Amino acid sequence: MEKHQSNTQQTKKTSSRRQKQNESRNQRRRLWKNAIKAVFGDKCQDCGYDKHWEILEFHHVIPRKISGRPPLTVTQDWQWEQFRDEHLEHCVLVCPTCHKERHINDEHKSLQFTDEADF
Ligand SMILES: [Zn+2]
């Protein structure tokens, strides 16, 4: 019984520590968003959509598989200057619709259709 109680306390301690970690991560994420917003602007660069900035996405002008750059999630711990240098010239901020359109356009370009009847 005593053992069970100490286990419960341990769990409480761990979860409050985790909560603190989450809070600082959220705080950092907010700061990053503001910084990114300041650099990239707060609207879709293709259609000007600006209702919900949070849903805007990065489009890599140079595909990651070619540039060899890591995904954005890996860069969370990077220094801001490094992020800016790595991404500023390779990314545009676009809404999800325009993001998909850009990828479709890229695919069409690389497929090189010779005949419209192929569609
Ligand atoms: Zn758009």
Image (spheres, rainbow, N blue to C red):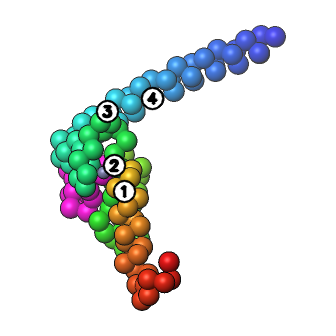
For mark 2, give the secondary structure. loop
- Say which label, 4 or 2, has the lower sequence index: 4
Residue 48 seen in the current view: yes
Q: What numbered label is drawn on residue 21? A: 4
Name the amino acid type tagged 1. His
Q: Residue at x 34, y 29 (%)?
A: 27
Q: What numbered label is drawn on residue 99? A: 1
For mark 4, give the secondary structure. helix
Q: Residue at x 50, y 78 (%)?
A: 119
Q: Position of residue 46 (x, y in %)?
A: 25, 55
Magenta segment boundaries in residue numbering = 78-95
Name the amino acid type tagged 2. Cys
Q: CB of residue at label 2: within 8 Å of ligand 1?
A: yes
Q: CA distance from mark 2 to mark 3?
A: 19 Å
For mark 1, give the secondary structure. helix
Q: CA distance from mark 4 to mark 1?
A: 32 Å
Q: What numbered label is drawn on residue 30? A: 3
Name the amino acid type tagged 3. Arg
Q: Residue at x 34, y 45 (%)?
A: 56
Q: Which residue is mark 2?
A: 95
Q: Position of residue 93 (x, y in %)?
A: 28, 51
